[in-house]
Amino acid sequence: MATQSPQSAIEAAALRSDRFRLEREGDWKRLESIVTKIEQGRLRRLSDEDVLALPVLYRTVASSLSIARETSLDAATLAYLESLTQRAWFQVYGPRVSLFAWLRRFLGGGWSAAVRAMTLDVLVALTVMVAGVAVGWLLVASDSEWYFSLVPGQFADARVPGASREILHDTIFGNDGKDPMSAFAAYLFSNNAQVSILAFALGFAFGIPSLMLLVQNTATMGAMLWLYNGQGLLLDFAGWLAVHGTTELFAILLAGAAGLHIGRSMAFPGERPVMQAMAEAGRRASQVMTGVVLMLVVAAILESFARQLIDNTPGRFAVGGFMLVFWLAYFFAFRGRSDGAATP
């Protein structure tokens, strides 16, 4: 059998590419015209036939791209089809709103509506968190050895049962951002972020692990509150926590409520199928968790700046109180344009 010369092979490949293009180029050009009009915002110039044909043409061009790759057509054809396929995919399957529009809708009512739809779960999670603080307080009050089990070992140095008032006072006032109390605050933020994520992620187990995490986390705070109360510094320590704590703890509360919401939808789906109830609860809870991330960022900023700059208890309570009122007003008083995913 005679071998084909390099020149003949090139000519054959070019002929094959030209034939491939001629057979399908009409669909390519039509799809390109439709996509271009959409990208330029000229939707009114599209006919009903073009709108209906868009997904069909997209699949046709995607199929052409697959064939072109398998048959090693010329680079120019491949590049053209890849670019057209990407543009068409975005119009067929891409997001329908811009990031700014989504953020405006989310902050303008979608997030708060999702939280209000979980009011029962929020109340249950709040009750559990308060109970966790009480448990931590009562355990160390009955036996101070519990303190070392509840408070992380790396922070049980000066802040231990029996510490003097002066030592404890110095840990919350006159901070320059480099003392052990700042490390404790950093630990709290890191720990609370992990607890928030786990409380949400473990909600599938009927919400029980989520509630247990809330108890464990707030029991540590209860032990610390007992310690400072013993030296008459309860309000001062609460003020130190309030600066970022009203935001951070609120975020944990919502994360726990989101996990509980999913678990409750599994245990009590009502008249809906379990999978449908879980899907609806999951969409609502994911909205809340998106907001929880934003709250943790805000808490980190408050912890990094406001807590260091304000070195008196009234000022700290003012900042923490303002943030608490702000979040309560936003979630339960603000009625903006809600997102459909938040509908119970």
Image (cartoon, rainbow, N blue to C red):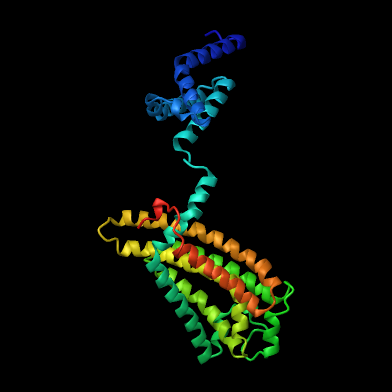
From the viewer's perspective, tell me whether residue 309 is left or right of residue 22: right
Label total for image: 0
Percent coordinates x, y for residue 253 in the rendering: 48, 69
Percent coordinates x, y for residue 55 in the rendering: 41, 30
- Considering depth in this image, is 175 or 100 the residue closer to the camera? 100
Percent coordinates x, y for residue 120 in the rendering: 37, 68
Residue at 44% from the left image edge and 34% from the top image edge: 92
Percent coordinates x, y for residue 90 in the rendering: 49, 35
Residue 315 occupies quadrant: bottom right
- Considering depth in this image, is 322 or 154 the residue closer to the camera? 322
On the rendered image, what quadrant is the C terminus found in?
bottom left
Residue 259 occupies quadrant: bottom left
From the viewer's perspective, tell me whether residue 16 is left or right of residue 270: right
Question: From this viewpoint, is residue 204 visible?
Answer: no
From the viewer's perspective, tell me whether residue 159 is left or right of residue 114: right
From the viewer's perspective, tell me whether residue 214 is left or right of residue 144: left
Residue at 57% from the left image edge and 19% from the top image edge: 74
Q: Residue furthest left?
A: 271
Residue at 74% from the left image edge and 73% from the top image edge: 176
In this view, 133 is above or below 205: below
Question: From this viewpoint, is residue 317 visible?
Answer: yes
